Image (cartoon, rainbow, N blue to C red):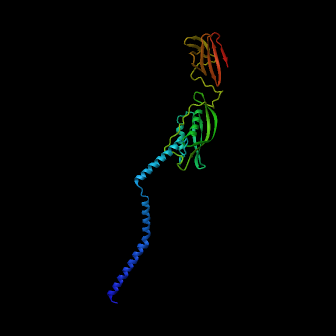
Amino acid sequence: MDRKLKSTLGLIGLLVFILVAGGSYIFISQNGKISEKKNKLEELKANDYNTEQLTLQFQDLLERSSVLDSVLAARKFNIPQNLSSIKFYNFVNLVSTPYSELSQIDVEYLEQKQDKEFFYFEYKVKGKATYNDLYNMIYSIEQSKELKKIKSISLNNMVIADENAIPNFIVGFEMVVGVYFATNDRFATAEFKENDLSTGSMYDAFYPLIRNEIPPNVDELLDVQGAKLLALVPEGAFLSDSKGNTFLLWEGEQVYLGYLTKIDYDRKKVSFILNKGGIIEKVELQLEKETIKKTD
C-alpha cells in the first residue's frame, strides 16, 4: 500500500471519528439540556400574562383585601401576628401616663403559653393605685383592641398619708395578664387603631364608710367643736373658735370637716353639717344661750 492511500484512509478514519463523536455529543449529551430549555420556554409561555389583565386582577384582589380588612377592623378585638413581648410594657406606660402620683405599677414578664391555636405572653402586673386608676387599668386591658385577658387578680385596701398627714385610701393589687397573638395574620388588621379606653369617674368601692383617720385642719378653717356664735349681720355670721380666733362666714362656706348650711336670723342660730370620718353630724350654734346642740 503506497503512501498516498494510507493518508487517504487516515483522513477518512479521522472524519468518521469526528462524526461519531459530534453525533454522540449532540444527540446524547445535548439532548437533555435541549429538552430542559424547551420545557422552560413552554413554562414561560404559559405564564406570559397580559399586563392589563394582571392589573385588573390586582385591583380586584386589592378591593377584596380592603373589604376583609374592614370586617376585621369592625370587630371589637383583633389578634396580632407574631407579637413582640415588649409591646405590653409600652401599652401599660401609655395607659398609665395620666394616673395619680399615688399610683405605682410594675410589670414582670413570666412566660409564653399556648391556648388552642393561639399563643399568649403571660405577665404579672402588681402595685398600688387609686380606685379610679386601677379601674381604668383593668378596663384598658380587657377592652384593648389587641386581645388581652386578666387571668387572675387579688385586691386589698391600703391607707397612705401624704406630707400633710391627710389619709389617702388606695388599692393594692396583683394580677396575671395574658396577651394573645397568632402565627398568621388571619385575625389582624392592616392598620391598627386602638379602642376608646377612657373611663369616667367611678364610686370608690374601697373607700371606708366610717374611718378612724380624720384629716388635720391644714387650712385653719373654723373648728365648730367648741366654737361660739358672736353676732349675726346681713353679710353672714361672726363666730369664734376655742382658741379665740374670729371668722365671718356665710351660707355654704366651708368649715373644718363640713359646711355652714343655714343662717336663721329669726331664731338667731346657725347650722352646720360635719363629716367626722363617715359619721354625719348636724350642729347648731345659738346666739343667746351660746350652746351647741347636736342632732344625729
Q: Residue at x 64, y 37 (%)?
A: 155
The location of residue 119, given as percent across then percent down, is: 58, 48
Image quadrant where one finds the N terminus: bottom left
Q: Quadrant of the C terminus?
A: top right
For residue 19, above or below residue 125: below
Q: Position of residue 42 (x, y in %)?
A: 43, 63
Residue drawn at (56%, 13%) of the image: 236
Spot occupied by residue 208 in the image (x, y as percentages of width and height): 64, 29
- Name the residue furthest right: 296
Q: Residue furthest bottom?
A: 1
In-front residue for pair 211/272: 272
- Residue 269, position as x, y percentages in the image: 62, 12
- Whether 55 is drawn above or below 296: the answer is below
Q: Residue furthest left?
A: 4
Place residue 222 in its image quadrant: top right
Q: Is residue 296 left or right of residue 11?
A: right
Q: Is residue 26 above or below residue 83?
A: below
Q: Is residue 282 above or below residue 111?
A: above
**205 or 226: nearer the viewer:** 205
Number of dots carrying numbers: 0
